[in-house]
Image (tube, rainbow, N blue to C red):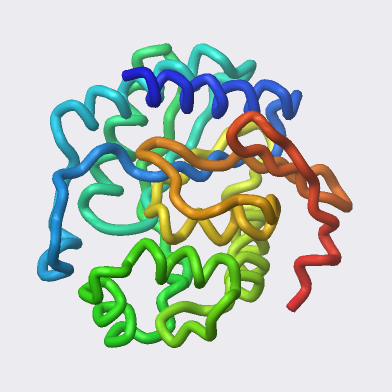
Amino acid sequence: MGDLNKKMIWIKEMMTKFYGIEKKVAVIRHAERPDFKSLKNESELGITNEGCAAAIQLGEEIGFSQNTSNFQVFSWGSRRVTETAKAVAIGLAKTKRNVVGPSPIVFPSPIRNCKEYEKAFASGRWNEYVENWLSGQNPQAAFLPVETYAKATYQSLLDEKYCASGKVSIIITHDLHIMPLIKYAFPSFRSWIKYLDGIVLKDDGDKILIGFDGESTSIKRNALKL
């Protein structure tokens, strides 16, 4: 539980550091799932019992750390994402918070070509492929460019539905959805994030505050234009 507790600390720290309850969103990877070596039926893969317990704990930790009683939880992805979102909502509810959701949402995936994506996954060099995508070292047929995807997704996250006054939004999704957001805001980021890790963002008018792994930065709103 050491890594989990560390990530909980960072997420709580970022959510607390961005003082106030208005227009704040946490985007978090799903909880632990069983390993898989094929993409066949991977969307039906759920989370482990340990992952469920950790997600409930994360919900409690976030609930106790925030100065608002109003939360909304969203799931952006497959079964393991949905199960994690439900567990986080249970944890929030245990802290006597008002919780809406989890509700499903759909943002565009960073995957541009499914066949190329499947080929890369089966190549035995998946980690290298993803790292090259994030660093921009090689042309990538499987994924959208990091900057293009990150800008469009940040714009979507800033929608009033998620960045809502008086509420904190928690969005559960996949690592491949979050890593380009981190890379765009923190260029030194290398590649992978752990289960229940993620970013916190706050709409601060003409700029967006972004927090990850104990660090914070900002992005000017007009820089997100495509």
In the visual, does 120 lie left or right of 71?
Answer: left
At a point 17% along the width and 68% down the height, the residue shown is 39
Which residue is rendered at x = 19% and y = 26% of the image?
A: 50
Residue appearing at x 59%, y 18% in the figure: 66
Viewer-proximal residue, 1 or 18? 1
* The quarter of the displayed image where residue 10 is located: top right
Q: Position of residue 117 (x, y in %)?
A: 32, 78
What residue appears at the point 11 percent right and 70 percent down from the top-left corner? 40
Say how many tags the image has. 0
Q: Quadrant of the N terminus?
A: top left
The image quarter containing residue 109 is bottom left
Q: Nearer the viewer, residue 3 or 144?
A: 3
Q: Measured along the vertical axis of the image, is residue 79 above or below residue 147?
A: above
**In what quadrant of the picture does the C terminus appear?**
bottom right
Q: Is 34 located above or below residue 145 in the figure? A: above
Q: Among all residues in the image, which is located at the extreme right?
A: 206
Does 53 sit above or below residue 126? above
Q: Nearer the viewer, residue 63 or 129?
A: 129
The x, y position of residue 193, in whole percent, is 44, 45
* 15 versus 133 height, above or below: above
Query: Where is residue 15 shown, x and y percent of the image?
Result: 63, 27
Q: Position of residue 216 (x, y in %)?
A: 73, 37
